[in-house]
Image (cartoon, coloured by chain):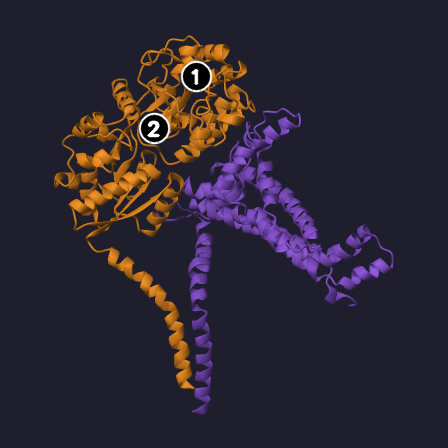
Amino acid sequence: MKGKHFLILALAFLMLVPGFIFAQPAAEASKASTMRLAWWGNPTRDERTYKAVEMFQAAYPEITIETETTGWGGYWDKMNTQAAAGSLPDLMQHDYAYMLQWVQRNQLADLTPYVQKGIIDLSKINESFLSGGRVDGKLYGISLGTNAVCLTYDPAVLAKAGIAEPDSTTWTWADFERIALEIYRKTGVQTIPFFTTDPKVGFDNMIRQTGKATYGKTGLGFTDPSVLREFYAIQLRLLDAGALIRPEIAFVSVSPEEGAFAKGQSWVEFIWSNQYVSTQAAAKRPLKLALLPNIKGATAKGTFLKPSMFFSIPASAENPEAAAKFLNYFLNDLSVNDFLMGERGVPIPDDVREHMATKVDTINKQIFEYISLASKNAGPIDAPDPAGSGEFLKMVRDVTQEILLKRVSLDEGVSRLMTRGNQILK
Amino acid sequence: MKQLSARKRAWMDDFSGYAFISPWLIGFFAFSIIPILFSLYYSFTKYDILGDPVFNGLENFRTMATDELFWQSLKVTFFYAFVSVPLRLIFAFFVAMLFNRGTRAIRVYQAIYYVPSLVGGSIAVAVMWRRLFMADGALNAALAKIGIVTDVSWIGDPNTAIWTLIILAIWQFGSSMLIFLAGLRQIPKELYEAASIDGAGALRKFSHITVPQITPVIFFNLVMQLINGFTVFTQAFVVSGGSGDPLNSTLVYALYLYQRAFKYYDMGYSSAMAWVLVLIIGLMTGIVFKTSSSWVFYEAKEGK
């Protein structure tokens, strides 16, 4: 009888054995020679990053890297959960929009000690590329590439309409509107609403031209809504003329291939420069890049150089030294950048950028040239997005649709955006 | 001495029983009970995931009263549940009736008709749904073929977008259909034979035999599908790309809850929302149970 009980118990414990087995590698992973690396990406980026990891491990055989990658959406769910659980990786890709919130909650480590120890070499990097990663003088992230907002257009459509290509350093929104109307009149090609995924990016550029910022210390950073009003007024005028793609079509979230621009229904699309490769691939025709138009009586530069993404070391990292070594290798090594090919944005060390400029294909060359044009026409970057920005962006997108769908009048929509904005960002 | 060993043996019996179900117990506590208790606690706190939760009493519940999107999401969810659940059940019932004839290929058909239930939440379906209901999508192309030329973007117009999700829900009728089919098979043949002898037509047999006999199954399906309807998430998430577009017309409750938690770092508020949803579902289910005695027919109760 006793023997039987023993057998039953033993069997029961046997069932728990898989648990112990699975727990085993996790315990081993915390050894000093292993680090975890996480990024959000796409198949191209993943492939190039795996290659970089492989090359690093060949150069530093004592360090093993475990990788985690997902798309943008899932990435932040995962990282937030890991932050709550205290199990963040040693090195993670970070974004300007979330950096401040993470720093304020003490989730990220200051990288300055690693720079001082010589593990991370920043000697070939201009300070203007680093400032985006600084909060209160401390360095919390190193930019993996430079990005700038831009407008891409189809030169063939302009030629067909007999319109000269604009000089994008001097053109105004009035020019833009005139061109859009003329193109529609002569070719029937329409204009897509401005920045449908994130309309704030569009009017932010205009507000910056007045010397103000969208976000203030508390609430909105501007009080005069006239520029904001103009942002929507232009689109409503185009809509009434039939020249704007209807919001019911433009605001459906689709892949680049399904978008109105790729299908040739719009002559223009508003993007970030690091989206140019995929936009071009979807459009399958020659495109050009231009700066956003100027507002009347601009007093400052609307465009700014934005770190496309960062590498940051979480405060809870178990192996920050290895993470710093990989970061330095990823940033400065010429041979690894031959594989990365500026996919995350135009590289920030001078020597890497010069080296890359000779190697990239025509599409990437256009981006490099655009970034150099933008850097000559850029103002300083605004402070990182405050808490509540996620909700603000959502509200902006909602109100934008309400205005363009004519559910609310222009004035009502703009005043709602101002009031709700100040409430959310208080 | 003997008594003690008997007690010991009883204890051993109990223990080995629990040890055997321990994998399930551990899972139940670690992945259900503990998270549920935590979410109850979080619902009374301000918790941004990255920091520590701070107790703030009933503040989250008070905020809901003035949160426009909260009411919008409730409106969308109630509309979705009250329209899609009856339609799905009627459709499932109808298809089950067809299959009850019993052709030989029935199992193949069952499998085929069950497929939408399996793939309904996948990205591929989201892409397909967009292609179907876009302004230049397949639906408008088909309409143009029969002479109705329209360029309505069914999926982009706030007035019609929710219907694309309702159609998706109806399309996923598989599991309800299988349960109906099992129910139909249980109805004694003698009832129909007797009715035929009495001269009842097909319609009368349907309304006086099939429907009353199947009411317990309708009841079961109604409760299950109501719960499903109120907690709908995946379909809305994939079709709108996680946004609830256009203009929050597909912002179902669970999607808004998700946005609150993981986009706006507002875990406390979304936990509170989750508990409100529990109350709503409890209430709806309660109402269905209360009314069931007047329309659900149980054979065992007969004659009492």
Front one among B293 and A416: B293
Classify B156 as above or below A108: above
Residue at the extreme right of the image, as rendered:
B198
Q: What colour has chain A?
A: orange
- Element type at marker 1? helix
Residue B126: image x %, image y %? Answer: 50, 39
Whole-Å distance between the Cαs marked 1 and 2?
35 Å
Chain bearing tag 1 is A
Residue A414: image x %, image y %? Answer: 48, 22
Residue A277, labelled with which disc? 2
Residue at the extreme bottom of the image, as rendered:
B1
Residue B244: image x %, image y %? Answer: 51, 36
Chain that the image shows in purple: B
Of the two numbered discs 1 and 2 in the rendering, the one whose residue sits closer to the viewer: 2
Front one among A199 and A290: A290
Residue A174 seen by the camera: no
Residue A226, labelled with which disc? 1
Q: Identify which amino acid the numbered label 2 is placed on.
A: Val
